[in-house]
Amino acid sequence: MYIKNGNLSTANIIKALQLEATSLDEKWVAESFRRSLCMCPNIFFFTSPEHMGGCKLLDGSLIYVSSQSVIPGLEKLFSDAVLDHKLLPHENEFKTAIKNYKEILPPSWKAKFMVVERVKSILLPWFKNYGLIDDRISIIVYRSEEDKIGCIALAKRINYESTCVNSLMDKDVDVKKILEAANDIPVIFTFSLAIESRRNCSQQFTDIMLDLKRENGIEHPTRKTIILLTETPARIPEGLPAVQLTIDEKIAWGDIKELQRLSGQFDYSLIEFFYKNKFATNELISNEIKEMHRLSRDRDFTMNGLGVQKEVLEKLGGWANSKVLDSVYIRTPKQRVRDSLKIFDDFMYGVIRDTHTEKTDGAA
């Protein structure tokens, strides 16, 4: 029997025990059950997580929720998003998982952009600590089906079983519902609309815009990155906050199934490390922000990406009314994107070097 939120009202007990179908007096049976329950010394309360990804428990500790968190027999108490979020546990050492993944990655920096997106989605709880929220989407323009599938394989994290994603062209796709359910993962949509078509998918894009602005009426908005794969960028509404990357070079994607499998092992290793070393992860993020601040002064970077609250910017040196970002969102020219990926690589190498950091649960 499941009683939501510990509500032991007579009406709730009658409903949970289905006493309407009995010949006994419902209220007396409910009262007898309530008293017996209150006298029982072995009562345990279970709080189901609100969503997938990083979730804070009642004691303030941060855990990662996936299908692994589901208790057998209590599946109906978990959301579909949690049930569908399937990690790939493995027993490889952290450094081995990183090494295996690097060896199979396409050499193109544009392919690595997808990897940075997936890593950033795992780190969103820590970015939020510094007031960093993703305030724009990533538009990836592809020229072939092979490139589209390759991008999905490197960016998708909900599971690693297929390259199926939602299309904004599908009238049955509820964009608002999908964005509300997703947490700490990249949400990937496809969009392909001929120039002469009269359709514009305006409601879908409105839902995305409202989610970015936190104006969609969702009381407790989730964290996520949004990626839009398209062949027709000209049909995307003007004014949609975005960075755009065009796959205009030949990329050898290799075995997609193997790429997904090792992506899954890579994610699992990062999640295990980050969540077991919360304090060290927080320090890494803090240092990353400081590095971005330094680079913005030294190289006059144009910042396009993560919005930072005024008080955080002031702590970073009077950046009020400005933008700062992690090591991904530098729009143009290409060299700047390559520089940002180099910073990201250095950041990840630092993570690997610090695998023996004292495992202390810092604020997360």
Image (cartoon, rainbow, N blue to C red):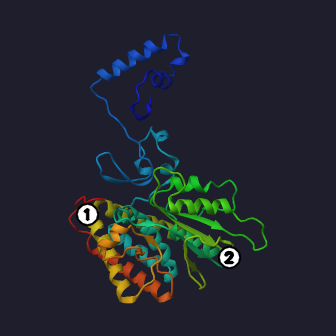
Say which of 180 and 67 sits in front. Answer: 180
Task: Report the side of 316 relative to 266 (left or right).
Answer: left
The numbered mark at residue 234 is 2
Residue 108 position (above or below residue 68): below
Q: In which quarter of the image is the C terminus?
A: bottom left
Disc 1 crowd rating (10 Å Cα; few below 14, some 14-19, many 20+) is: some
The numbered mark at residue 115 is none
Say which of 337 and 91 sits in front. Answer: 337
Task: Report the side of 134 relative to 59 (left or right).
Answer: right
Give the residue displayed 75% in from the left and 74% down from the top: 195
Q: What element carries label 2?
A: helix
User: Is residue 183 in view from this perspective?
Assistant: yes
Name the residue beneath numbered marker 1. 279
Disc 2 crowd rating (10 Å Cα; few below 14, some 14-19, many 20+) is: few
Say which of 340 and 249 sits in front. Answer: 340
User: Is residue 277 in view from this perspective?
Assistant: no
Residue 295 position (above or below residue 37): below
Give the residue displayed 29% in from the left and 72% down from the top: 315
Q: Is mark 1 on a helix, strand or loop?
A: helix
Residue 100 position (above or below residue 39): below
